[in-house]
Image (cartoon, helix red, strand yellow):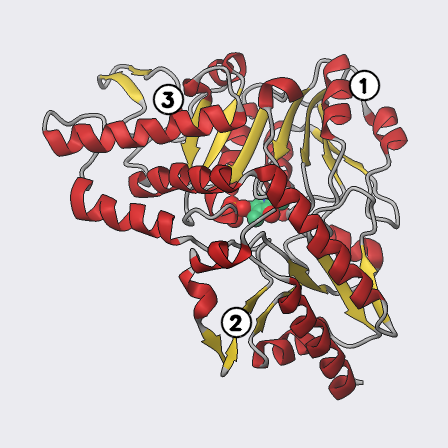
Amino acid sequence: MLNLDKIREDFPILNRNVNGKPLVYFDNAATSQTPQQVIDVIVEYYSKYNANIHRGVHTLSQEATDLYEQARIKIQKHFNAKHSHEIIMTSGTTHSINLVANGFSSLLKKGDEVIVSALEHHSNIVPWQMLCERTGAILKVIPMNEQGELILSDYDALLSEQTQLVFVNHISNALGTINPIKTIIEKAHQVGAAVLVDGAQSCPHIVPDVQALDVDFYVASAHKMCGPTGVGMLYGKEAWLNKLPPYQGGGEMIAEVTFEKTTYADLPHKFEAGTPNICGGIAFGAALDYMNAIGFQAIASYEQELLDYATAQLNAIDGLKIYGSSSHKASVISFNIESIHPYDIGTILDKMGIAVRTGHHCAQPIMDFYKIPGTVRASFAFYNTKDEIDVFVSAVKKAKMMLS
Ligand SMILES: *Cc1c(COP(=O)(O)O)cnc(C)c1O
């Protein structure tokens, strides 16, 4: 059981009003809110430790380095990676995916095949399309069904000796579908293909165990799990990270530089060119501490309650259609009402202090599948309440009345 009163006190932003109404923040799939405990770590960093890391002889630099490397170890432990150097600090999911896609440019040849799913965020589509353009590899797509689930029998048919890579999200940001990634990974490995899992939407709700999953690459963003924006991580199996060439050149990622030849630093620094988001990395670690102290089991079961409660109430509204009805679903509800434009509903909800997202949610192929321009998306976090859902549902009814 979560102590909601206590949890809500941790999030100062939940006290503010928007357009004269108490904020109801249901845009958690776009970014989560930040608890005071993480804000304090950010303030403390700039008040006490701010220095560049890794090369400093002075005390501040050493302290900042220690904090940053401790954060890496927190991330390693959280995801159960075997080695801390298998955790590459990045600016987020998008950066992590581009790093891997760029690295595979030198490993793929014309005619090789890579497989994406129909449920992906643009971040997990476009870098691979660019990779295919560079290498002549062929992009294949695992199709989805009306419920918003991947069709695994079609996936079986796509896999072959030519398949080099499969990339799929753990949870869809647009529909909330939880994909059977363990099965997807096992099947890919049977043909010798590597798998990258986009965990941007799963990490706020569940704890992925990268060793148990036997996943080759797993990526996430801190800002969707109570951390700051502009920081995230790439987990990669040591053997893969050693095989991939560096992504960016610069300081920090080198062992030795001369004008004749440069040798690269060992993992993880080989992939960490330039001064990173030091404070962000440390705050990412603090966000993991915060969420782990609450407990992911409790978070997931409470969010399931919120999802069921909201789904039942929204389904009772005439003309409202929810997209994505997988039995394995995270706390995301995408919907439309008759032919009302999602943007118009979102605008009216905002007038009532309610933050939802409208549009294609960076997943245009899913919208094309349903032949719609977009949806209204409400996404819940563990600090949301049933009372807020009541406010939201009556606001949706009001919006419907005003617009139809
Ligand atoms: C948010 C999101 C991304 C992109 O994350 P950034 O932090 O913007 O890089 C990628 N994939 C999914 C599934 C997402 O939800």
Question: What residue is at 87 percent from the left and 73 percent from the top?
Answer: 319
Q: Which residue is mark 2?
A: 23
First reached walking from the N terminus: tag 1 or tag 2: 2
- Residue 357 in the image, given as x and y percentages of width and height: 62, 64
Residue 155 image point, x, y percent: 83, 29
Residue type at mark 3? Lys
* Residue visible at 46% across and 38% down in the picture: 288
The reply to whether the C-beta atoms of the residues labelled 3 and 2 are less than 8 Å apart is no
Q: Is residue 15 above or below residue 229?
A: below
For this orientation, the residue located farthest to the left is: 58
How many residues crowd around disc 1 within 10 Å: few (fewer than 14), some, or many (20 or more)? some
Location of mark 3 (residue) = 270
Residue 386 visible to an observer of this rendering: yes
Residue 322 found in image quarter: bottom right
Disc 1 to disc 3, C-alpha distance? 32 Å
Image point (76%, 32%), residue name? 180
- In front here: 330 or 384? 384
The residue carrying pointer 2 sits among few (fewer than 14), some (14 to 19) or many (20 or more) residues within 10 Å by Cα, namely some
Dot 1 and dot 3 residues touching (CB under 8 Å): no
Q: Position of residue 191 (x, y in %)?
A: 76, 14
Residue wearing tag 1 = 160
Where residue 67 sits: x, y (%)? 28, 32
Q: Earlier in the sequence, mark 3 or mark 2?
A: 2
- The verdict on label 3 being within 8 Å of ligand 1 is no
Farthest residue to the bottom: give it: 402
Marked residue nearer the N-terminal end (1 or 3): 1
Q: Nearer the viewer, mark 1 or mark 2?
A: 2
177 lies above or below 166: below
